[in-house]
Image (spheres, rainbow, N blue to C red):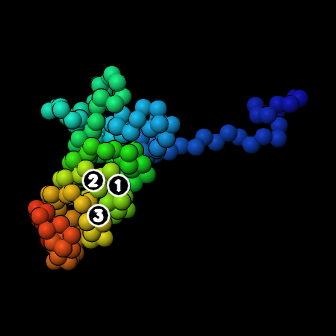
Amino acid sequence: MGALSGGRRAGLLPYTPVTLSPSLLPTLVDYERIRNAGPDRAASEWLLRCGARVRYHGQEKWQKDYNHLPTGPLDKYKIQAIDATDSCIMNIGFDYIEGLKHVENIRLRKCHYIEDDCLERIGQFENLQKSLLEMEIISCGGITDKGITALRHLRNLKYLLLRDLPGVKNKENLVQAFKTTHPSLELKLYLK
């Protein structure tokens, strides 16, 4: 039968495709896209593909549809707020957020893939240390005291809402830590 035997090329193993979970595909980081489109555009694309919403400076309306992202000069649309309610954002994609310089508000609500390492990264990003003013973390089961404590590096944080976080056990220590580092912080705790 020559080089083919039984419908396969002799000596080669059958092709086995590698598949990723569909929920993980939007989280992979495209560093070339960040360089070419800029951090705000690349982050907008990633956040919207993951089911989050963004709001740009000077805009009242939340952007939630990937297919209707604004066009124009890349430096025109700067992300001011991120609402990741019910989204699939996770640590692996946070490289998209690192370059954002104008984010003032982040809401993480019912984010099943958010864990302490995500909050640690948010606290380490120099741009967010300067720009972030308000943060809400609600019903994210992977968050513990360790992740919340990492937010103390956000030196301009004025408002922090924590609600329904079963992994957060020691409210008193959190309150004391933030009173020391952020005496003017409005800290709202609705934890059991």
Q: From where the camera sits, is residue 74 visible?
A: yes
The one nearer the camera, 121 or 64, is 121
Amino acid at pointer 3: His
**Total marks placed:** 3
Residue 53 image position (x, y, % from top left): 25, 39
Badges 3 and 2: C-beta atoms under 8 Å apart? no
Q: How packed is label 3: few (under 14 Cα within 10 Å), some, or many (20 or more)? A: many
Amino acid at pointer 1: Glu
Residue visible at 27% across and 39% down in the picture:
79
Q: Which mark is residue 130?
A: 2
Q: Which mark is residue 126?
A: 1
Q: How packed is label 2: few (under 14 Cα within 10 Å), some, or many (20 or more)? A: some
| 32 over 103 or under it: above or below | above
State which tag comes first along the sequence, 3 or 1.
1
Q: From where the camera sits, is residue 82 visible?
A: no
Q: Secondary structure at mark 1?
A: helix
The one nearer the camera, 186 or 44, is 186
Tell me if 69 is positioned left or right of 159 in this view. right
Badges 1 and 2: C-beta atoms under 8 Å apart? yes
**Residue identifier under label 3:** 153
Q: Which mark is residue 111?
A: none
* Disc 3 to disc 2, C-alpha distance: 10 Å
Residue visible at 21% across and 70% down in the picture:
181
